[in-house]
Image (cartoon, grey):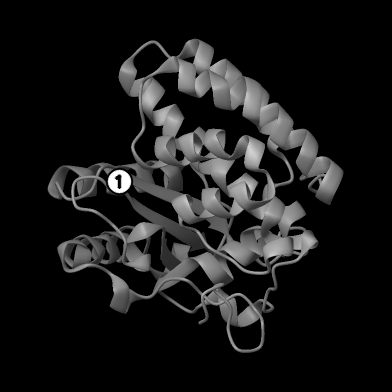
Amino acid sequence: MDERGLDRDGTIAREGALARVPPAFVPVVDAARAHIAETFGSTRLHSAYLYGSVPRGTAIPGVSDLDLQLALRDEPTEADRADAQAIEAALDRAFPQIDGVGILLAGTRLLLSDIERHDAGFFIACLCTPLLGPDLAERLPRYRPTALLARETNGDLARVLPRWRAAAAEATTDADRRTLGRVVGRRTVRTGFTLVMPRWGGWTSDLDRSAELFGRYYPRRARQMRAAASLGRAPSPDPAVLGMLIDDLGPWLAAEYTAVHGEKAPRP
């Protein structure tokens, strides 16, 4: 993998590996694997994956969260979601080195569908590290840093902004604002990065590097994007920062994204 996150053929390299998991997080990953296997079994679970800072090897004890994606044989049910939440809570209680656990659920049919080929499919193939079961990446294409990939991964910011505004208005505690700030900061930076990704010609999930690359092409918005990266890494309860991202940078970014790459294909 070169400095742009590409393999020798110019396709985006898978960014994580179990061998890169920091020693402090190995027991967490082992426990997650055991909980998932025991709870879901082979009848419900097709495969499980890690993503985020833990498999990238950049996780910080006491700061980083644990992110998991489960590919189920059928579409997720309420019982599946309840079981996932129970695993999240059990891991979060048992391991102080993680600051929360998030488990995403999706059916294999959706993950391999044509409509998700350049969104959820890309996520599995390039951003997820296999933990249990057969790797769905073997049934997906190799990806390049194209405008199509940009549009289908992050071309829906305009649809997300109203939900963020509503959530910000309803946030009554510092904890609520920190939780929302982490989501808004990370998503804003990733949208900013994928806006310039085809011009730069590579892939990164690092928030600070993403913000820096964005700033090369949009220097007038660089300071705001650095603030978004900071919020994504270490969420602040300051409503002014959240408001700046949702009401100023966000609308500009959504409009610029649509102008450059178009809008993401609607989902059913």
Q: Is residue 242 above or below residue 226?
A: above
Residue 108 seen in render: no
- Asked whether, in this view, residue 257 is left or right of residue 124, the answer is right
The spot of residue 233 in percent (x, y) is: 37, 42
- Asked whether, in this view, residue 221 is left or right of residue 152, the answer is left
Question: Within the image, what quadrant is residue 13 found in?
Answer: bottom right
Tag count = 1
Pick whichever, 141 or 7, lies toward us: 7
Residue that lies at the very extreme toward the bottom in this rendered image: 8
The spot of residue 230 in percent (x, y) is: 41, 38
Amino acid marked by disc 1: Glu
Residue 148 seen in render: yes
Q: Residues within 10 Å of mark 1 (few under 14, many from 20)?
A: many
| Residue wearing tag 1 | 88
Quadrant holding the C terminus: top right
The spot of residue 50 in percent (x, y) is: 39, 63
Residue drawn at (67%, 79%) of the image? 142
Q: Is residue 44 above or below residue 235?
A: below
User: Tag 1's secondary structure?
Assistant: helix
Residue drawn at (70%, 73%) of the image? 144
Pick whichever, 161 or 66, lies toward us: 161
The spot of residue 27 in percent (x, y) is: 16, 64
Q: Is residue 37 above or below residue 224?
A: below
Question: Within the image, what quadrant is residue 123 found in?
Answer: bottom right
Residue drawn at (19%, 52%) of the image? 61
- Asked whether, in this view, residue 175 is left or right of residue 167, the answer is left
Residue drawn at (68%, 74%) of the image? 143
Question: Within the image, what quadrant is residue 23 found in?
Answer: bottom left
- Asked whether, in this view, residue 246 is left or right of residue 100, the answer is right
Pick whichever, 62 or 137, lies toward us: 62
